[in-house]
Amino acid sequence: MKADGDPNLIVYFGGEYMPLREARVGILTHALHYGTGVFEGIRAHWDERSQELFVMRPVEHYERWKQNCGILRIDVPLSPEKLCEITLELMRRNEFRTNVYVRPIAYKSAERIGVATDDQDEFAIVALPFGDYLHAEKGLHAGVSSWRRIEDTAIPARAKICGAYVNSALASDEVRRSGFDEAIFLNESGHVAEGATCNIFMVRKGKLVTPPVTDNVLEGITRDSIMELAQRELGLPVVERSIDRSELYVCDELFLTGTAVGIAPIVRVDHRQIRDGAIGPIARQLNESYIAATRGHLVAYRKWLVPVYRGQQPDLVRLAEASVA
Ligand SMILES: Cc1ncc(COP(=O)(O)O)c(C=O)c1O
């Protein structure tokens, strides 16, 4: 199995599988200077019980990627299904038997000075062994950043546009240097938007509340999965509405969601403890359901998973029935 940072890690670049050390871009590449790329983040989880690696909602990730590439008029010439096949092949070639993070990136590749774009696009897919992104076992202390979330009228937050992550980097750096674990963004209207690289949920008065996609948030796939789990598994009503900053201080529970982090509970915000300062029951139950679903242990959510080593969906269904029996 190839390790993170291994120069022999097999990546997909320029239409070929090759070692990471050979996948290089030029110093004048447009995207390096102007941030004109769009990336994705996909997870695969290793399940010890079935000795299988399950990729989480890869078709939806590639559909989102291709749509968002369209915002920058970057063309990814392959279908989501073909991109999934490449992703599975990368995992097999690297013989991964652990949790994995997949990073597709498409970018403006012309090597010249000048911000105007043209039709020279490239894309690459890298898959790496990847453990926990945030260490949230005891709950996080989040801080509201003084940086505001980018507006759709400047750089669309709904797409993972490379240049937009300067906004996330500034907020993240600011709050970490001030001693917090993670940043929370407000948007220009002063409402809570999201974390630096995650969506946000609050439990208040028996409902799960999250900002609408029109409040300058990334349209998270984990956000969507959590809303489904909350309604189906916990019978919890889910509401998409704007959230005030001060609601964070008086809510019952707060947590972040994202492909890299999964579910990360927040137990303090801006030096204010949330309830008793312990991880709340809803975050805990959702986390358990999410872990079970992403490892193939819940039949109802097999639809989200594509197995790497056992081939296609029918095998997965048989596996599901066997593990439930
Ligand atoms: C800014 C931002 N918000 C939210 C998310 C969560 O989205 P998803 O659940 O699709 O990973 C991410 C990253 O993945 C992100 O970068």
Image (cartoon, grey):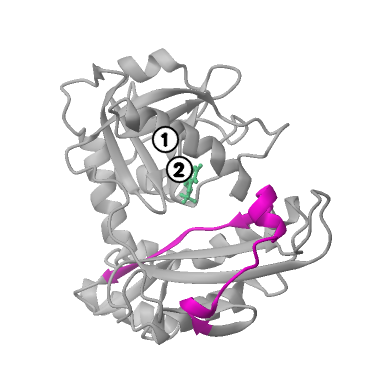
Pointers 2 and 1 in contact (CB under 8 A)?
A: yes
Q: Which quarter of the figure is the C terminus placed in?
A: bottom left
Horizontal side of 88 relative to 178 (left or right) equals right
Indicate whether 233 appears above or below 88: above
Residue position marked by numbered label 1 in the rendering: 172
Q: Is residue 207 visible?
A: no
Q: Is residue 75 visible?
A: yes
Per the rendered image, the range of residues in magenta is 18-46
Mark 2 or mark 1: name the one nearer the start of the chain. 1
Q: Residue at x 24, y 21 (%)?
A: 274
Mark 2 burial class by Cα count in 10 Å: few <14, some 14-19, many 20+:
many
Horizontal side of 298 relative to 7 (left or right) equals left
Q: Is residue 32 magenta?
A: yes
Q: Give the percent coordinates (x, y) of residue 298.
A: 30, 63
Q: Give the percent coordinates (x, y) of residue 107.
A: 67, 61
Q: Give the percent coordinates (x, y) of residue 191.
A: 52, 20
Indicate whether 220 appears above or below 315: above
The residue under label 1 is which amino acid type?
A: Ser
The residue under label 2 is which amino acid type?
A: Thr
Q: Give the percent coordinates (x, y) of residue 115.
A: 79, 48
Residue position marked by numbered label 2 in the rendering: 197
Residue 30 image-quadrant placement: bottom right
Q: Which quarter of the figure is the N terminus placed in?
A: bottom left
